[in-house]
Each structure stands twice: as C-alpha cells, then as structure tokens.
Amino acid sequence: MNHNDIRVALITGAAGGLGRAFALRLAEEGLRIALVDCFDTADVANAVRERGGQAESFACDLRQPEQIAYLYSQVMEHFGRCDVLVNNAAYIPLKSLEATTLLDWSDCHAVTLDAPFLLSQAFAPGMRERGWGRIVNLASSNTGRPQKGFMAYIAAKMGVIGLTRALAVELGEDGITVNALSPGLIRHPGSSAALPAGLFEQVRTSQMIKRTGEPEDLCGVLAFVVSDASAYMTGQVFNVDGGFLF
C-alpha cells in the first residue's frame, strides 16, 4: 500500500485523557493520526511515534469557525485526506441553571455540537469521493440519567445524538457510517481535576460493573466502529458505561 493510501484519523480533544487513548489505539490499528486541540498535543504525538505510529499536531479553537476552516486546509495539505473523524472534544461548564451564562451555553454548544457539524461538513465530501468513511461522535450517558450541574453539556450531547442520526441518513448511501459512543463517567487527569471525587463514587455504585471507567474501556468499541467490520451499522449510539444506562 502506498503511504498516501494509509487511512487518516482526525481526533479532536486530542490533548485530553480520552483523546490520547484514542490516538494510541487507532495508531496501533495502522491509521495515521491528526491530533487536534487548543492545548498542546506534542506529548501525545511523541507517544504515538514512540510506538511506531504516525501523528501530526494541529492547534484549533473549535469555537471559531474560521479556525475550523483553516484546520481543514492544514490537514489536507499535510495528509491529503481524512477517512475517520472522531469528534471527541467537549467543553463542560459545571454550573447550575441560575449560574449558567449565555456565553457558557454558547461555548459548550460551539465545541460539543457545532464543531462536529462543521468538521463533518468539511471532511465528508472527501470520504464520499473515496466511497468510505467513518464519523464517530461522542455522546454521554449523562443524557439518559442526568446529573445536576451539567445542563448545557447534557443539552449539547442530546444534540450530538440527533446529529449522529441525521448524518447517518445524509451519508448512508456513500459508504460512510456515522455512530456515537456514549461513555459513562471516565476517570482521567482532566475529569479527576474538574469533577468532585464523590461523583465518581456515586456513579460507580449505580453501575452494573462496579468500577470506574478508564479511557481504555472505550478504545475497543472505537476500533471496531471505525473498522471495515462495522460497515453495516450506522446511526447507532453505543453506551459504554459499565451498565449505567440499560
């Protein structure tokens, strides 16, 4: 296979715990990785390369449509293609109804819902041309059993589920599948710093599998959903949450 024929996966929110785990796993699956974040992803790129994979870092503030447009041009200039789009990035303002400002609401929706739409719109035409593509959105089990303080995030993630189904209809005839992973509460450095410790225990005890989720718990499902083996499956939401939702 020509180097330029190797599939490329773009992962947003690549500097975080989930993004890092996703990048390492998809690199193991043989994909070249475009790492996208407004934070530095150099350590993730190095980790991929140390394991023999290929990765390139791209800085982008997903709240800014013009930066998304520039990201598209950069990715196409460097890789020439994007076959797998993993819309992982999210912004979570942990605030009550009264404390949530319109800016909180807008930023949350811009990163969590608008960016997946804009990125899908940008990269789907190339997938169509090649007759193959995978778009994976990140939903949340918080939509099914909401926790207090996550109002803007829950609303945005419900939008992500709707977007997943709508894109699946739009792209289903073109060899492109669109599915969503719906994680439960996953422990990684970012979530541990941002969320109260008691929430992890509360969620853990309400799951069927009585342990806190780790980023690697999502990687097997992700690898399957972006593979050729999942070609007959689209518009689905996969709860990967230890049985939090059932």
Image (spheres, helix red, strand yellow):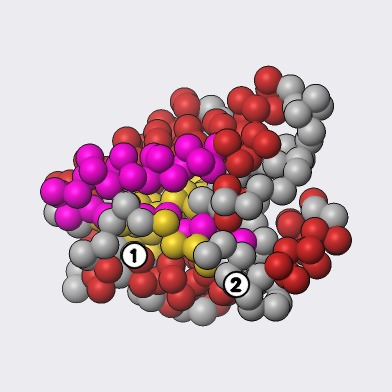
Region of the chain picked out in magenta, as a range: 156-184
**Does residue 56 appear in this view?**
no
Q: Nearer the viewer, residue 227 or 97?
A: 97
Left or right of 234: which side holds 158?
A: right
- Secondary element at tag 2: loop
> Is residue 167 in the magenta section?
yes
Query: What amino acid does circle 1 point to?
Result: Val
Left or right of 134: which side holds 57?
A: right
> Is residue 79 in the magenta section?
no
Q: Earlier in the sequence, mark 1 or mark 2?
A: 1
Q: Residue at x 32, y 52 (%)?
A: 235
**Does residue 28 appear in this view?**
yes
Q: Residue at x 17, y 55 (%)?
A: 175
Q: Residues within 10 Å of mark 1 (few under 14, many from 20)?
A: many
Q: Residue at x 64, y 78 (%)?
A: 209
Where residue 106 sits, quadrant-wise, is top right
Image coords of residue 68 (percent x, y): 45, 34
Q: Nearer the viewer, residue 177 or 47?
A: 177
- Secondary element at tag 1: loop
Image coords of residue 170 (percent x, y): 22, 40
Left or right of 85: which side holds 195?
A: right
| Numbered badge on residue 242 | 2
User: Circle 1 is placed at which residue position?
Assistant: 226
* Position of 4 relative to 80 (above/below): below
Image coords of residue 213 (percent x, y): 65, 71
Where residue 153 sits, quadrant-wise, is top right
Image coords of residue 244 (percent x, y): 61, 65
| Numbered badge on residue 175 | none
